Amino acid sequence: MLRNIRKLVAGSVALALVMTVAACSSGSSSGDSSKAVTADELKMPSSPVTLNLVDVAGDMQVAQPMIEAYMKKFPQYLAKVNFDTGDATQIVSKLKAQQAAGANQIDIVLTGNDALGLGVNAGVFLKLYPDYQKQIGAAVDTYQPGAKQLFDMTDGYATVNDFGDYGPLLEFMPGTVTDPPTTADALLAWAKANPGQFMYAQPANSGPGRAFVQGLPYILGDKDPSDPINGWDKTWSYLKELGQYISFYPSGTTATMKALANGSTKMVATTTGWDINARAIGTVPEGADVVALDGTSWIMDSSYITVPKGESADKLAVILDLIKWMLSPEQQAKAYDTGYMYPGPAVKGVTLDMAPKESQDVIHKYGRTSTYDELLPKFKAVPPLSNDALAKMFDKWDREIGGQKLQK
């Protein structure tokens, strides 16, 4: 049975973290980072540990099968994992409070770069690499180039668990939109001729929304796609004009997919993963189609594994061994999942025929193999905005484009 579509939170994208954060090593169970455990001091525990995991990025459906396989294989190390979900905007303050009180209750956080960036700035996450290269270095060395680029942008505070989810794309029903736009000018003209019928969600809370907005500077030929404040003159002008024909902006991607499915809108922004997964689980009709605008650059995305500071030596040893396990080719094949983070695997040498049959069936049926085999090589893949630049983009978009037209 297909699992439900993952909750999309503000940061499923990767962001550069150019910052200095003190106390980068693991601490004791009291959260005192001055009592760091070095890589050479770590050893696997003599009795199994229990870990508490919080997912603020919707990545649990990919990570949980990998983790459960580790528990089954190594019950002498890992007895149980308590899986929970949380809010990316609240997890950092929660970790900070727990660490200040010396009462850590969270051992692993699955995150996008929203909570990752905030957490690194706040000093609540452990620096994993190169501090623990002895434990995870060999696995990190197997990253495929795009995943390695996004890993490098975390400055060592997280590992990439799954990778891909390229956008921006436009999704529509062929029976409703018979001549879909293939240029930015054509999209603007279509939106003007069909007011209220094009939709994308608030970028701060939507991967497809972020991909659409971040992709426009490349499509429009703006001065500096990496600088939303000083280099996006064409993009902001375009978004303002386009916004005249958008009735409202949903606060999340799922609402746009449901609107497409029920016919209340005719075209929405999407990504490869949202396209495949939403059709696979029935949120969007199987017959929906996609198109890429001329001049597109693919905005890469990924999900991350982070470790809060203050872990005991026993727990940290198991967590690092678990990360190494999750980055093995056998476990990475599970990242194909139901197509959400398409393609999914972050390491080299993982092919679809290695994935579970359920994943193979989904990709074969809903993966648009011929479409994406043509489209993905056609355009270059680029990293998302840096942490600081993305925050500025969110703020400017909220103030000048869509903040007054949000619908929760």
Image (spheres, rainbow, N blue to C red):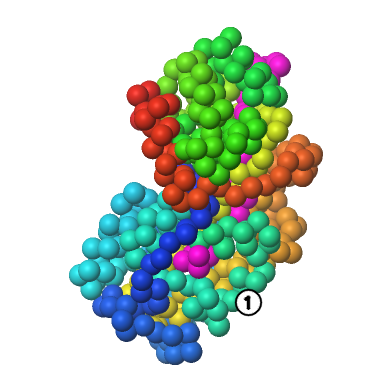
For disc 1, the marked residue is 138
Classify residue 235 as left or right of residue 381: left
Figure quadrant of residue 208: top right
- In the structure shown, which secondary structural element does the residue marked by tag 1 occupy? helix
Q: Amino acid at mark 1?
A: Ala
Q: Quadrant of the C terminus?
A: top left
Question: Is 219 located above or below residue 300 in the figure?
Answer: above
Question: Is 87 located above or below residue 223 in the figure?
Answer: below
Classify residue 136 as left or right of residue 402: right
Instruction: Tell me what residue is drawn at x 33 percent, y 75 percent.
Output: 310
Instruction: Tell me what residue is drawn at x 50 percent, y 68 percent.
Output: 156
Q: Is residue 100 visible?
A: yes
Q: Is residue 168 visible?
A: no
Figure quadrant of residue 315: bottom left
Measured as percent of width and height from the top left, residue 103 is found at 24, 71
Please state which of residues 195 and 240 is positioned toward the viewer in this rendering.
240
Instruction: Tell me what residue is drawn at x 46 percent, y 66 percent.
Output: 157
Q: Residue furthest left?
A: 101
Instruction: Tell me what residue is drawn at x 58 percent, y 57 percent.
Output: 150
Question: Is 286 located above or below residue 46 in the figure?
Answer: above
Classify residue 40 as left or right of residue 379: left
Measured as percent of width and height from the top left, residue 116 is found at 43, 57
In the rendered image, residue 165 lying in the magenta stretch gets the answer yes
Measured as percent of width and height from the top left, residue 232 is found at 53, 34
Where does the magenta region start and end?
Answer: 155-180
